[in-house]
Structures are given as structure tokens and as C-alpha cells.
Image (cartoon, rainbow, N blue to C red):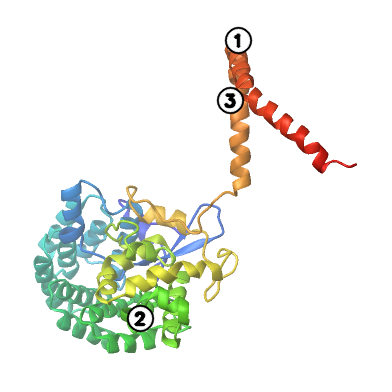
Amino acid sequence: MSIWRFGTSLKATLTVPRRCPGTPHYYQKASHVLSCKVWRNPLNLFRGAEYNRYTWVTGKEPLTYYDMNLSAQDHQTFFTGDTPQLRPEDAVMQKAWRERNPQARIRAAYQALEMNQDCAAAYVLLAEEEATTITEAERLFRKALSIGKSGKDINLLVYIKRRLAMCARKLGRVKEAVKMMRDLMKEFPLLGMLNIHENLLEALLELQAYADVQAVLAKYDDISLPKSATICYTSALLKARAVSDKFSPEAASRRGLSSAEMNAVEAIHRAVEFNPHVPKYLLEMKSLILPPEHILKRGDSEAVAYAFFHLQHWKRAEGALNLLHCTWEGTFRLIPYPLEKGHLFYPYPGCTETADRELLPSFHEVSVYPKKELPFFILFTAGLCSFTAMLAMLTHQFPELMGVFAKAVTHCLHPWVSSQTRWKASCHPVFGTS
């Protein structure tokens, strides 16, 4: 699949086949046959109000070029894909999404507004990139919504409504956000690939509406639908919180697991098999970073995104993290060769590490699964060979010094060798034949 780049010409861009909004990108490494689906993060942050704040404080860039390039493709598809004929402001916005420099994108958005004050896509870009607070972003999205309602661009309308719901969630109006998400899912039921239900699950967990969470899981945790860390780990959390407040490893080892505890452990094993990187973030064995705008399912990028938003929900369920801590590593006994055969899912894809390194910033230590550990025999042999080679080199360079060293070692070992000889001589009558 061809890759769109920041700064490519409009003609070159239009020759690339369009993707349907919400469909995954495919990460393919050169001549390798294996490819990995890269999905848009359903809960991705706002660049101006969140990502840029991190850069101002730390001086580090939380987003990679590859990640932002995928977002440029998404925005072109979402906001200009359904227009039969490009208007002048649309052509400007197509160029704006491809600009690598944030200030250039913002200037292009204002240029589009000078051409047409009713350019909803320009307000979307300003809400995403120029607004420095969520409140300001919400105001700009509302302006875009008032314009977008009169248009026929369904993709743009869905995007704006979803981001408005996310603004409400971030500003503490969680019930309002839940209603907006439910209305959006009812209004556009065929856009399930956008994974709006994952936004809904997170908001319902914040309300501690666990019955509603279970109802959403019953609809989307289906064998025919693509799984995600959010689906698998939320299911595990619900089953864990039912038993975790009274769970004790010592008591469980004495009496065995109850049926409810067994269900919780099996749900945890299922979640860990799907994405084995998540537990270390939930248990705070690895430090979190800001999630990327795109994630690789079953990869470290998905684990970062899930834990960033859901760690607080696990902490709120008393004992849930303790149960996870006691049981998650047991998963690996069920799948000793995860790249060859899975237990409940397909074998773990071997291309995740390479794709995650493209999606996650360089200052983050990418989690690798399974660990590539060398057998002890190979390590021992390599160490012995290195030691022998070093002795040979030193003997060649400093023969006299090494001769003195050899005599000193022999002198030190002589008493021990003599004692061993005397011991064998004294034992000969006992162990020898008559």
C-alpha cells in the first residue's frame, strides 16, 4: 500500500486509493510478508491542549513522524473524501492536513476560513491543534458542528460529535458524554469500525455503571468482532472486582479457587494472552507515556493507550490489581510457544515490535514479547571462548608477564592439588579392590 507523506503534491495524493474511515492501516516492513494492522486510537488526545503541553514541559515530542503521517491520511479521508468536486477551501485544507509544521497547518486553516467562513474542517483543525485548553477546543468544535449539520459530510459530522463527547468527558460532564456517545452509536450504527463503544466503556467505568458496562461487553465481546485490549481487560476487570476484595493467595492455595475466582483468573489469562504488555503498566512495573494517535492491536502501543486511560478504574476496584499481580504470569504456562500456537487467540504476531517502534517515541523502552533469551549453555560457551581469546591475546602481547602470572597461579594451586592427591591415596584402600 502506498504511503502518503507530509508535503506531497495534491495530484500525488489523489492518485492513492481511498480508505473507508475507521479501517486500519497496514504496517508492512519492506520485503517481509507479515503485516500488522494499525488502528486509530479511539481515545486519542488533543494535540494543542494535551500533546503540546507535554512538549512545553519536557521538551520531548510525544508523537512520531510515522504516527502523524497516518493521522494526515485519516484527516484527508474523513474531511475531504466525500466531496464530488473540490472547493478552493477544500484544496487548502487538503494541503493543511499534510503540512508537517503545526504553525503551517494552522495558517492554512485560517486561509481556508478567509475563503469561506463556513469551512467546518478548518474549525476542526484549529480545535485540534491551536486550542490550548479543552474548553477552547469544545467551543471550536461546537462552531464546526453548527456548520456541519447543514452539510452532507457524514464523516465530518461523526468526527465532530465524537470529539465533543470526549470534551465533555474530559471536562467532568460524564453523563452528558455517555448520552452523546449512545446517541452517536444509534444514529450511525454502521460505523462500528470507529470503535466508539470503547469511548463509551471508559466513560461508563468512570460512572461505575458496571451493569451498563456488562451490557456493552455482551454486544461487542463477540467472536465475530475484532478484539481489543479494552474489551478483554474490561471483561477481566468486571469478573475480578466480583471476588478481588476478599481474595487471598494463601487462602486460595489451601482451599483452592471458587468458581467465581476461577472465572476471574481465566478472564485475566484471556486478556493477557491477547495483549501481554498491559499488566506491567497496570502494576506500575513500567512507566507510562502519553498514548500515540494510532495503536497496534496486541502490541505495546495498545497497552500504553489502554493503561493510560484505564489504570484508574483498576485501582478503584479493591483488590483487582492484587489478583492481577498473583495470576497474570500463569498465562505463559498455557502458551509456551506463543509465536507458533495460541490458546484462545491466534498465535502472537511477530511483527509487533518493529511497528511499535515506529509508533512510539524513541525515549520509550518498547516492551518486547516473547523475550528473546539465549540458553545458559550458549551464554556460558560464549563467555568461555571470550575468556580464552583474551588470555591468548595477552600471552601474545606480554609473554613474560603472562609467564610470571602462570607461575603465580600454579604456586597458589599447588597446596590444593597436593591435598587432593593425599586424600585419594588415603581413600584407595577403602574404594579399591582387594
- Kindly identify which residue carries mark 1: 400
105 or 192: nearer the viewer = 192
At x 37% / y 76%, what residue is drawn? 248
330 or 100: nearer the viewer = 330
Are there few (<14), some (14-19), or many (20+) residues within 10 Å of tag 2? few
Position of residue 205 measured from the top left corner of the image (x, y, whole percent): 25, 79
| Mark pair 1, 2: CA separation | 78 Å
Sooner in the amino-acid sequence: mark 1 or mark 2 = 2
Q: Is residue 85 above or below residue 424?
A: below
Position of residue 156 measured from the top left corner of the image (x, y, whole percent): 24, 74
At x 12% / y 61%, what residue is drawn? 131
- Kindly identify which residue carries mark 3: 390
Picture quadrant where residue 401 is located = top right
Q: How many numbered discs sit on the rendered protein?
A: 3
Picture quadrant where residue 301 is located = bottom left
Position of residue 146 measured from the top left corner of the image (x, y, whole percent): 12, 77
Q: Nearer the viewer, mark 1 or mark 2?
A: 1
Q: Is residue 200 above or below residue 327?
A: below
Badge 2 amino acid? Gly
At x 11% / y 63%, what residue is drawn? 133
Secondary structure under badge 2?
A: helix
Badge 3 amino acid? Met
Sooner in the amino-acid sequence: mark 3 or mark 1 = 3
Badge 1 amino acid? Glu
Sooner in the amino-acid sequence: mark 2 or mark 3 = 2
Secondary structure under badge 1?
A: helix
Judged left or right of residue 62, residue 143 is: left
Secondary structure under badge 3?
A: helix
Dot label at residue 192:
2
Are there few (<14), some (14-19), or many (20+) residues within 10 Å of tag 3? few
Q: Nearer the viewer, mark 2 or mark 3?
A: 3
Find out whether the residues at labels 3 and 1 contact each other: C-beta distance under 8 Å: no
